[in-house]
Image (cartoon, rainbow, N blue to C red):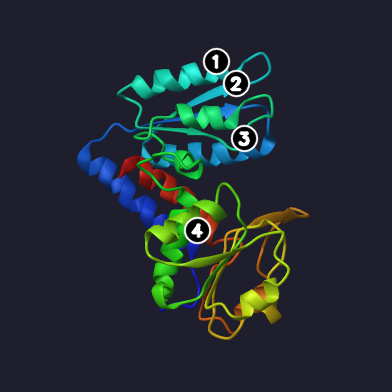
Amino acid sequence: MESFFNGNEIRDNILLGLRKKIFDDKKNVQLAVIIAGDNPVCEKYVALKEKIANKLGVFFCLYRFDKGDTTEDIVESIKFLNNDEEIDGIMVQIPVAPEFDRDELIRAISPKKDIDGLRYCLKLDSEFRPPVVLAILEALQRSQKNLQESKVLIVGRGFLVGDPLFRTLKEMGVEAIVADSATTNLKELALKSDVIISAVGKANIITPDMAKPRVVLIDAGTTEQSGTLIGDIDPLAFKDSDYYTPVPGGIGPVTIAMLFKNLIG
């Protein structure tokens, strides 16, 4: 077993299987993506999704809304897409501009087409789990750690990662402790943990002295510094770990692959 999660390789293998599935099944797959507002970060992520869609042979439908549009305008478009039998999946790129009601947009998406799992994040019914949660579960499975017998720590209680991950693990019978900005004994909790999953987006919040030997370290948080992606976990902490996910090249690449796996099946 490798000691680290090779996200780029795993992503490529998943996408290769999905492309073969589309070809073998002669499927016509369509994805609708909504951008609500003018945000360069959103544009970057949507462009990456469009690139992968093109490689897979997925028809990519992009809908842009900006100043002059309302939440109701977007909701009406989502309802139209819900009823369009040719559209297989709908996602709203997060974050949305503050003039739009994010939760109302999410609620409008059909549970059957909620491939980004945003309804699940909002604690609503959905047929899908968030792709980032699925990527983390893939990493945990590859670590071969017995989660039911492990002390699991989730650092971060966010809407998109920490909270939905905690609930998903609980559904699997895995009890986890969640630490957030109010936690005063993070180091103490970390040193007692067999698995640490960090999803804060704060560079090197998990330092080497917080990771005991043979721990599994899952880094699902990133920040950008001088054009370089930095993870939540200091790479020096990986030295004595059993298994770890690097940044870049870890959870991130597999997350986008899992989005298309939700779409294609």
Q: What residue is disc 1 on? A: 73
* Farthest left residue in view: 25
Residue 51 numbered tag: none
Residue 65 numbered tag: 2
Q: What residue is disc 4 on? A: 166
Q: What element carries label 2?
A: strand
In the displayed structure, 125 sits above or below 156; it is above
Judge left or right: residue 247 versus residue 258. right
Circle 1: is it few (<14), some (14-19), or many (20+) Cα within 10 Å?
Answer: few
Query: Which numbered mark, 3 or 1, is in the foreground of this view?
Result: 1
Circle 4: is it few (<14), some (14-19), or many (20+) Cα within 10 Å?
Answer: many
The residue drawn where x is 37% and y is 44% is 262
Identify the mark nearer the N-term, 4 or 2: 2
In the rendered structure, which amino acid carries the disc numbered 1? Asp
Q: What residue is disc 3 on? A: 43
Disc 1 to disc 4: CB gap under 8 Å: no
* Relative image position of residue 207 (x, y in whole percent): 70, 74
Judge left or right: residue 72 versus residue 138. right
Query: Which numbered mark, 3 or 2, is in the foreground of this view?
Result: 2
Identify the mark nearer the N-term, 3 or 2: 3
Disc 4 to disc 3: CB gap under 8 Å: no
| Depth order, front residue of 20/35 | 35
**Marks 3/2: CA distance?**
13 Å
Disc 2 to disc 1: CB gap under 8 Å: yes
